[in-house]
Image: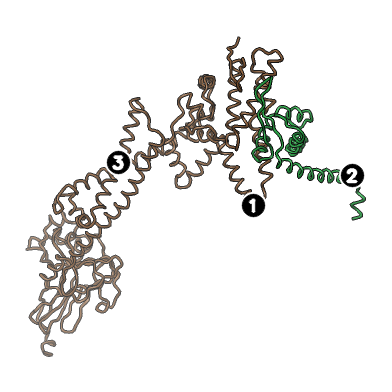
Chain colours: A green, B brown
Amino acid sequence: MNIENAKSQMRKGMLEYCVLLLLKHRPCYASDIIQQLKAAELLVVEGTLYPLLTRLKNDGLLSYQWQESTQGPPRKYYALSPEGEQFLEGLDAAWTELAGTIIYLKNIHPKMLESK
Amino acid sequence: MKKNITINLCGRLFQIDEDAYDMLQHYIDSLRHSFGKQEGGDEIVDDIETRIAELFDELRQQGTQAITIDHVKAIITRIGQPEELTGDEEKADEAASAGHRYESARQAAQGIYDNVRARTAGKKLFRNPKDKLLAGVLSGFATYTNTDPVIWRLATVVFTAFYGVGLITYIILAIVLPEAKTPEQILQMEGKEVTPQNLADVVVEKDEATAQQPNLLRTLFSLLLKLLFGFFVGMAMIACLVLCLGALFALVVIVCALALPITSNMPFSLDTLGLAGLYQTNPMVLILFTFSLFMLLLIPIYAIIHMVLSLTGKTQPMGVGQRITWIILWIAALCCVVPTGIIMNQYSDDYFHQKYDHHVSYRYQGVKMSEEDRDFLRKGGWNLLTAGNCDHYTWSGRHPTGDGEQRYLDTYNDNCEAVLRVERSQEVKPGVYRIDCLVRAEGPGAYVYAMAADSTYLMEIPAYEDKPAGLYDLLQQELEYGREKAGGLKYLSLKIDSAAVRHHAECLNGWSLVTIDNIVSTDGTIAYGITSDRTVTGQQCRSKWFSATDFTLTRIADLPKSERQKK
């Protein structure tokens, strides 16, 4: 088992959640999201983001608006739709639970298992 | 120095090197191809194109005048290869929704389908001239499905073991599939874009390939396969030729038959073929047979003419669709010819069988037989006392005089089951008599008999089959003693002279002279004949056939005194 592979699997699982989180407070366009995700080392190749954005949009979680740009082609600004916000809340809850589980598992003491 | 062109990307103009442009174009095309099958695919590619435009913009702001191939390579690495982008998404989707067994099975099927689609995407099926052992069919399949040709070759060899399915399929495919001849077709075969660059590559590659040293083992293997294949094809061609000639003959015959008047006595008329009745009741069968036989011959001839013309460049070679249509038509014709041919054959057989039955439908003393049998028995005054399982009652061709037309008493049953008793009575003066006759048999159990005054005299027929037997020896002896000069052969009323004996020696085979002596007739009648009836002989007959001819009754003495006194 390749550690890099395992890491990338973990990142991939979280990518959707992270994108939704980034869009929670303000609309962003694709290159913005790419920059932030790259900073967080969540994205290896940029191209992965585009199919994801399109899928989220087609599922009704995202909506977008065209905006002219001063230095380049017009940009698609993505924002969370009301369904997207609901979906994000669901993911938040799941994440909290998951994080709790992981912290619990990491701190688990051998003696606790023996007592059971 | 490089040629530079201007492109319009999302409404913005960029200077770009030609090779960089080609690479970018190919990249975007392959993205479009990979995303094409999923929902919103075009939108994704448009977005990526926008992203590329942005990155180009950044480069320009950094002072880049023209975009080079290195820039494009860097951007492609940054955005990712199509496989990296689509594969991951699909896998994630699959993992998310794989729950039900049906669903996963469906996805597995979809996966295989996608796999095949992805492997064959953008390719055309051709025979591959670049890596061929025979005609390049399997190599073509391998290129088409992106697999190893060895798998296909092995599979073909294995399937050839099942009634030659593999070989036949191979031959059909070799005929149906066109070969990738032009560089353009080679690119289509390999699923590559037809661009000037790629075309040039193919041409260069071709030159390299011809310049390459051939692998000895491969050449040997190829040669062996070609020899084997040539052998099979040669055999098949000979068989085809024979079948073709047969079919042509059948066609000529049936056309003649249909053209001649029904009741004509000419050879090949419907009547002589025994098909007149079929024509009157069901002419469709004959017409269908003729027409499909005609097609069966015409289609291959047309195909050969077309092939010759296309090889000499006078017409375009047939397309795959056209070839398949002709093959299907030909198979349809074959499927018509075979059953109608069988029906006609059956009908003809039945007809002649009935005719033959009619032939043996003469009756003599309540027994069915041929006209010849009846006439012979009637003329000779023979009575059929027992007749069971007899194929016939008289025969010709083996008469001891060598006369092929001369009939004699004879019966035949392949299982030795013929039960025959045929006799005739003769009015005589009371006295002592002897009977001479010529007989032959295949096995024991057949008898010559005589009946007079409540006594039965039996003599078994010697079984010499067809070998030289008693009569031959006897005649030789008599010839040696020169007895024939003294008025014919001693024992026989037959006119067999020395020349006939020599000439017809083979006709004497199996015939013996049998004599029953001392037949005492007090009441003036003697009945005599041959039989295999065990109620008379007391023995099971084990002879397939037996024959008799030339019965001669000779008076040898007056009645003995004791007999006369009884009277």
- Where is residue B360 shown, x and y percent of the image? 19, 66
Q: Which mark is residue B167?
A: none
State left or right for residue A48 relative to residue B255.
right
State left or right for residue B102 relative to residue B501.
right
* Disc 3: host chain: B
Viewer-side residue, A107 vs B307: A107
Q: Residue most toward the bottom? A: B566
- Where is residue B174 shown, x and y percent of the image? 43, 35
| Quadrant position of residue B58 | top right
- Where is residue B294 shown, x and y percent of the image? 27, 43
Residue identified by numbered label 1: B101
- Where is residue B296 shown, x and y percent of the image? 31, 43
- Residue at the spot 69% in from the left edge and 19% down from the top edge: A71
- Residue at the spot 77% in from the left edge and 29% down from the top edge: A36
Is tag 3's residue or tag 1's residue first in the polypeptide sequence? 1
Residues at discs 3 and 1 in contact (Cβ within 8 Å): no
Q: Can residue B90 be seen in this view?
A: yes
Q: Which of marks 2 and 3 is in front?
A: 2
**Identity of the amino acid at label 3?**
Leu
Quadrant that contains the C terminus of chain B = bottom left
* Disc 2: host chain: A
| Quadrant position of residue B381 | bottom left
Residue identified by numbered label 3: B297
Residue identified by numbered label 2: A107
State left or right for residue A46 relative to residue B475.
right
Kind of element beneath mark 1? helix
